[in-house]
Image (spheres, rainbow, N blue to C red):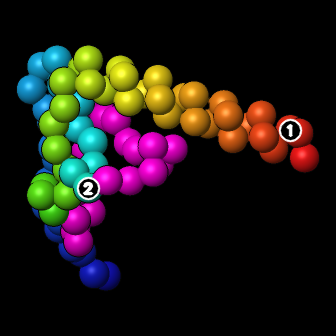
Amino acid sequence: MIQTTYTTRVLVPEEGHYITQAEEVNIKDRVFSSKVFLAYNDSPSNWKEITADEANELMAAKEAALREEANGEEAN
């Protein structure tokens, strides 16, 4: 039997903030989280903290983009 122990890095933002990708990504693919568990090949530098206000604006934009995409697919 093989037994392995892993260390998991967890990013938790300050109160009133969210974690999201540091690089520009398509708004439909953007993640907003109150906790991020990093994979072994991920780095904290790939993530950044944003305020709840910023996150709310971006989440509304994401919702609109997904709704627009869904409406476009319904038209086809």
| Magenta segment includes 27 | yes
Residue 74 marker: 1
Which residue is disc 2 drawn over?
Answer: 23
Vertical comparison of 56 with 48: above or below: above
Residue drawn at x 22%, y 65% is 42
Mark 1 or 2 closer to N-term?
A: 2
State the SS at label 2: loop
Residue type for callout 1: Glu
* Residue 7 drawn at (x, y percent): 13, 61
Q: Is residue 55 left or right of residue 17?
A: right
Residue drawn at x 38%, y 53% is 25
Vertical comparison of 29 with 55: above or below: below
Which image quarter: residue 52? top left
Instruction: Pick out the residue farthest to the right.
Output: 76
Vertical comparison of 70 with 14: above or below: below
* Residue 71 drawn at (x, y percent): 77, 34
Residue drawn at x 27%, y 63% is 39
- Which of the pair 48/35 is nearer the observer? 48
* Residue 34 drawn at (x, y percent): 26, 31
The magenta stretch is 24-42
State the SS at label 1: helix
| Disc 1: CA contacts within 10 A as few (<14), some (14-19) or many (>=20) | few
